[in-house]
Each structure stands twice: as structure tokens, then as C-alpha cells.
Amino acid sequence: MKIVDFTKHKKEKDGVFTPDEILDGAKGDLENVIIIGEGNDGDMFFSSNMVDKGRLLLLVEEFKLYLMLGKMDNEDDY
């Protein structure tokens, strides 16, 4: 699995991407997508194109493991 961390490519202006910039940057490169976020109103937001909820949960857990192990700090294949 290849993890591409868009935050590694910092913007020159303020170093922070907006959610729209992250989403625009991923267009055309993804087979499946899971979006987890917090709305401007503070409500939790979740959306995915994945029909298989078991596969979706497995992918979420894999990303959680990568985050906990600090493996999202580069773009290497894991």
C-alpha cells in the first residue's frame, strides 16, 4: 500500500492546505475514497464510495495503524 501524505508538500504561503485543496489534489488519483472531517458547524462528516463496509472498516483500521506507528511521515510503500 502506498501512502501519499499531502501535508508533506507544504504550501509556501502559510504551510497549511485547506480541505478543498486536499480534495482537489486527490482528484483523478483514487480508486476508493474515505472522507472523514469536521464541518464548519463542528459536526462530524463521513462519506465514501466504498460499498463493502468490511473493506471500508479494514482500510480505516490500516490507516489508524499507520498513524499510530508514525508511518505517514513519508511516501514510502509499506
Image (cartoon, rainbow, N blue to C red):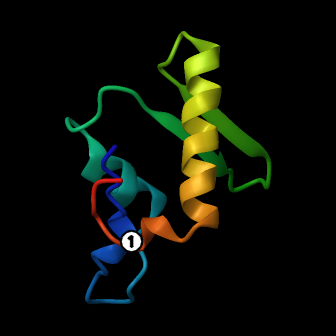
Q: Which residue is mark 1?
A: 7
Picture quarter containing residue 74? bottom left
Name, please, the residue furthest toward the bottom: 13
**Mark 1, secondary structure of its residue:** helix
Identify which residue, 15 or 77, lies in the foreground. Answer: 77
Q: Looking at the picture, how far across and down is residue 6, in whole percent?
A: 34, 64
**What residue sits 41% from the left and 54% below the top?**
20
Pick out the residue farthest to the front: 78
Q: Check the image and report above or below for 51 versus 75.
A: above
Towards the viewer: 26 or 31: 31
Residue at 58 percent across and 67 percent down: it is 69
Left or right placement of residue 44 versus residue 6 in this view: right
Q: Residue furthest top?
A: 51
Examine the rendered structure and indicate whether residue 11 appears above or below residue 54.
below
Image coords of residue 28 (percent x, y): 20, 35
- Vertically, is 22 above or below 50? below
